[in-house]
Image: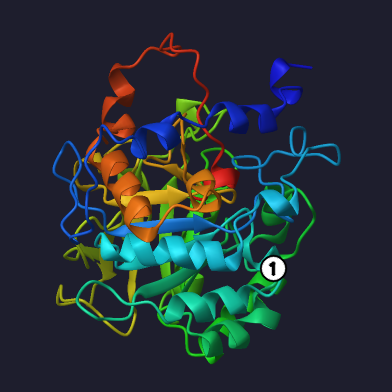
Amino acid sequence: MTSRTTIPLIDERRAARSPSTALTLSPLLPLLPATGLLGDQLGRPLHDLRISVTDRCNFRCSYCMPKEVFNKDYPYLPHAALLSFEEITRLAGVFARHGVRKIRLTGGEPLLRKNLEQLVAQLAALQSVDGQPLDLTLTTNGSLLARKAQALRDAGLQRVTVSLDGLDDAVFRSMNDVDFPVRDVLTGIEAAQRAGFGPVKVNMVVKRGTNDQQILPMARHFRGTGVVLRFIEYMDVGATNGWRMDEVMPSSEVVARVNAELPLLPLSPSSLGETAARWGYARPDGTHDTAAGEIGVISSVTQAFCHDCNRARLSTEGQLYLCLFASQGHDLRSLLRSGATDAQLASAIAHIWQGRDDRYSELRASMPADSGTGARRVEMSYIGG
């Protein structure tokens, strides 16, 4: 067996905490107010916050939580280590005062968190700096969505993204590695549409040689259904998925494959910092067939979008990460539980974000396989995708 199967990843989580708790409350640092205009070292605003509500998942996808690492002996976080719903809501409110307008709940599998709709209701009551409701969304593997969709919608959740890596049952069962059927995920997507979520988005991670033959079946299936299908390049997140560049299918190749059968035309970005390039299905006259809909491609390996990345990630136990490929977090939970005021929390977040210069994906091509730092990147299952 390789060392990858025996590394105690929970120790990596502990090691990933930075000394920022003491620094950000130091009397030597100015108390920075929340103005809604926070920028990092590259001038990027803080706009999106992704919150992981659990480090557990009921799938064992090879690119995220491979079974040989996340087995029955894997030491998941104890309940006391998790941020409570009240702590999450309090932090989210502080982030909103810094300019956050969108919150995505993620995991692990977020629907495994008991009574999640209660957290949704609390977050739905928050407002942006200009008094608007926050854009509140959730990413799920869809396994529990059929039974949860209506309650989540009633609580105030606005949008849902479902991860689905193929329609062929054998391929999908192999990728989730727990023998979960495609039909149950499709039933969850249909339930989300009935509950009023729209448009539902479906994310497919494309791994060359594993599920790339599912690109066209997925496009055919969701075309004209109101679902937005997005293809994601297989990424080198964390240290457990055995990532290799030759397993990455560039988004340009995905688009070409779909376009050869279902003609496409490029669409404008829907918002600043949008990770997906949009492609609409074309009519014979070359205009966008809005009834047929669109697809998206997320090219974080071949066409990095670090230059306008405006996302922060809050882990299940209150570690703030500034990049999906980070190796170090900032401990906000200790601040919360030490009695810090909202003003102190806001100042800590401001100091952390103002020091941000992360752009891993832009630098990837020029980096050696081992950068020599000794730092291992945080796992995607811990901070969400």
Residue 158 seen by the camera:
no
Crowd around label 1: few <14 · some 14–19 · many ≥20 (10 Å): many
Q: Quadrant of residue 343?
A: bottom left
Which residue matches tag 1? 143
Q: Residue at x 64, y 75 (%)?
A: 145
Against 248, is 347 above or below? below
Q: Position of residue 297 (x, y in %)?
A: 34, 54
The residue lying furthest to the front in this view is 27
Q: Position of residue 363 (x, y in %)?
A: 28, 25
Q: Residue at x 42, y 33 (%)?
A: 22
Relative placement, left or right, of 271 versus 323 is left
In the foreground, 355 or 344: 344
* Callout 1 secondary element: loop
Question: Which image quarter holds the N terminus?
Answer: top right
Q: Residue at x 56, y 73 (%)?
A: 119
Against 208, is 129 above or below? below
In the foreground, 101 or 20: 20
Q: Residue at x 73, y 54 (%)?
A: 79
The residue lying furthest to the top in this view is 372
Residue 208 seen by the camera:
yes
Name the amino acid type tagged 1.
Answer: Ser
In the foreground, 278 or 341: 341
Against 154, is 221 above or below? above
Relative placement, left or right, of 339 versus 174 is left
Q: Position of residue 28 (x, y in %)?
A: 26, 32
In the foreground, 149 or 84: 84
Relative placement, left or right, of 141 versus 374 is right
Q: Position of residue 110 (x, y in %)?
A: 62, 63
